[in-house]
Image (spheres, helix red, strand yellow):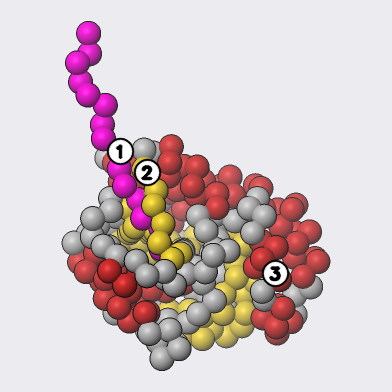
Amino acid sequence: MNSESPAPPKSGLIVRHVPHEGLAGYRTPIEAAGFELDRIDVCGPEFAHADFLSPDLLILMGGPMGVYEQSAYPWLAREIERIAERLELGLPTLGICLGAQLVAAALGAEIYAGPVKEIGFSPLTLTEAGRASPVAHLEDVPVLHWHGDTFDLPPGTELLASTRDYPNQIFRRGTSLLALQCHAEMGVDPRIDAWIADSGDYLSEAGICPRALRSEYDETGPHSERAGQKMIAEWLTQLAA
């Protein structure tokens, strides 16, 4: 008889910057890896005192604000400080879009406006390191991009993927940190309608037709999301190794 007790559940904390940018397709592989997920919103009263060090996995979601807009969003500076404390300890962290930019800032990189608004589905160009990493699941797969800011590659990190206009799309540090500018978690989640509805001026500036983008999401999104799920599942396996 096997008398071993089952492993205790691992804890995951999602930091959400706006309600319509959630974990989406990444939830399935993260929960399958044994994580019990909790969530805080930056606009909630609990955020000011949230513990960023205790969770086994910290997940930083996207949002429309820029890291450099700290006068308009005063909570940004303190969030970056807490992320830096976590990264200093090498604790597992996943950053997505704004979350990746916050990670870059916490590691000392500059964050600034990019050359164009990059919106819609397009493939990544993987580095040699990217092709040897879980990000290989995204090779030749059009993934959703929705950003206008970028960052310098933080010191001590490894570049995994780029696009033509945004050289620093995905980076990692060891196996404990993965930061993605793109949205490989999005492809089925219906909250894409809120993204589109809340981004009229942003889409217009980028020359994007909302109806065409929604159609592209229906056609391309499911395959993209499945690739993103495989990537996250493999990354979590490496964390557990």
Residue designated by label 3: 196
**Residue under the point 45% across and 48% down:** 232
Viewport quadrant of the N terminus: top left
Up-down relation of residue 90 to residue 43 (above or below): above
Residue 4 painted magenta: yes
Pointers 1 and 3 in contact (C-beta within 8 Å): no
Magenta stretch: includes residue 30: no
Marks 1 and 2 sit apart, C-alpha to C-alpha, by: 6 Å
The residue at 36%/38% (across/down) is 34
Label 1 sits on a secondary structure element that is: loop
Residue 140, picture quadrant: bottom right
Q: Nearer the viewer, residue 44 or 20?
A: 44
Which image quadrant: the C terminus? top left
Q: Residue at x 23, y 55 (%)?
A: 54
Q: Earlier in the sequence, mark 1 or mark 3?
A: 1
Observer-side mark, 2 or 3, equals: 2
Which residue position is annotated with label 1? 9
Q: Is residue 103 above or below residue 133?
A: below
- The spot of residue 227 in percent (x, y) is 56, 47
Real-space Cα distance between discs 1 and 3?
Answer: 36 Å
Q: The disc labelled 3 sits on which kind of residue?
A: Ile
Q: Which residues are magenta?
A: 1-15
Q: Element under label 2?
A: strand
